[in-house]
């Protein structure tokens, strides 16, 4: 009798944990993303130009008084070596910032 009770409790806890993970995952994956569109053509340091209407994803706000935005650039695999030199960095979460002045 005791092992049946323990099995029932374990089963109930497993189902409850699974449901909590499923609900948490749903809310995490369906959160809203703030998207910003450039009102005008913007010159970024390093000679980068963002045309009017370019959409950037809001990432975070820093206490030092600036915002971090994300821009993804897609390049076909065949064209990658034609446009870029590849080298490896030893930083797992390397971010190379460019400033809009």
Image: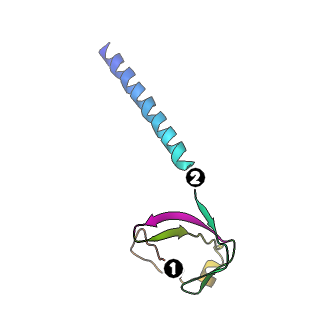
Q: Residue at x 46, y 36 (%)?
A: 20
Which numbered disc covers residue 15? none
Q: Is residue 23 left or right of residue 89?
A: right
Q: Which residue is mark 1?
A: 99
Crowd rating for badge 2 (residues with CA inside 10 Å; few <14, some 14–19, many 20+) = few
Give the SS element for disc 2: loop
**Up/down of 57 relative to 90, above or below:** above
Residue 55 is covered by the magenta coloring: yes
Considering every residue shown, the one lying at the far bottom of the view is 47
Please say which color scheme the image uses.
rainbow
Q: Which residue is mark 2?
A: 32
Residue 65 or 93: which is nearer the viewer?
Answer: 65
**Up/down of 99 relative to 18, above or below:** below
Crowd rating for badge 1 (residues with CA inside 10 Å; few <14, some 14–19, many 20+) = few
Give the SS element for disc 1: loop
Q: CA distance from mark 1 to mark 2?
A: 25 Å
Q: What residue span does the magenta drawing correspond to?
A: 54-63
Residue 38 is covered by the magenta coloring: no
Q: Residue at x 54, y 43 (%)?
A: 26
| Spot occupied by residue 67 in the image (x, y as percentages of width and height) | 49, 69
Main SS class of the magenta portion in the image: strand
| Spot occupied by residue 62 in the image (x, y as percentages of width and height) | 43, 67
Q: Residue at x 58, y 70 (%)?
A: 71
Q: Is residue 28 left or right of residue 79?
A: left
Q: Residue at x 58, y 64 (%)?
A: 57
Considering every residue shown, the one lying at the far left of the view is 2
Residue 2 or 58: which is nearer the viewer?
Answer: 58
N-terminal of the pair, mark 1 or mark 2, is 2
| Spot occupied by residue 95 in the image (x, y as percentages of width and height) | 46, 73
């Amino acid at each position: 009798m005791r092992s049946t009770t323990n099995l029932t409790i374990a089963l109930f806890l497993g189902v409850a944990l699974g449901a909590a993970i499923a609900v948490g995952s749903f809310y995490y994956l369906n959160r809203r993303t703030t998207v910003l569109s450039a009102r005008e053509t913007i010159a970024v340091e390093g000679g980068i130009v963002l045309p009017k209407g370019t959409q950037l994803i809001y990432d975070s706000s820093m206490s030092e008084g600036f915002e971090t935005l994300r821009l993804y650039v897609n390049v076909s695999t065949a064209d990658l070596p034609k446009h870029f030199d590849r080298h490896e960095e030893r930083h797992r979460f390397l971010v190379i910032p460019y400033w809009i002045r």
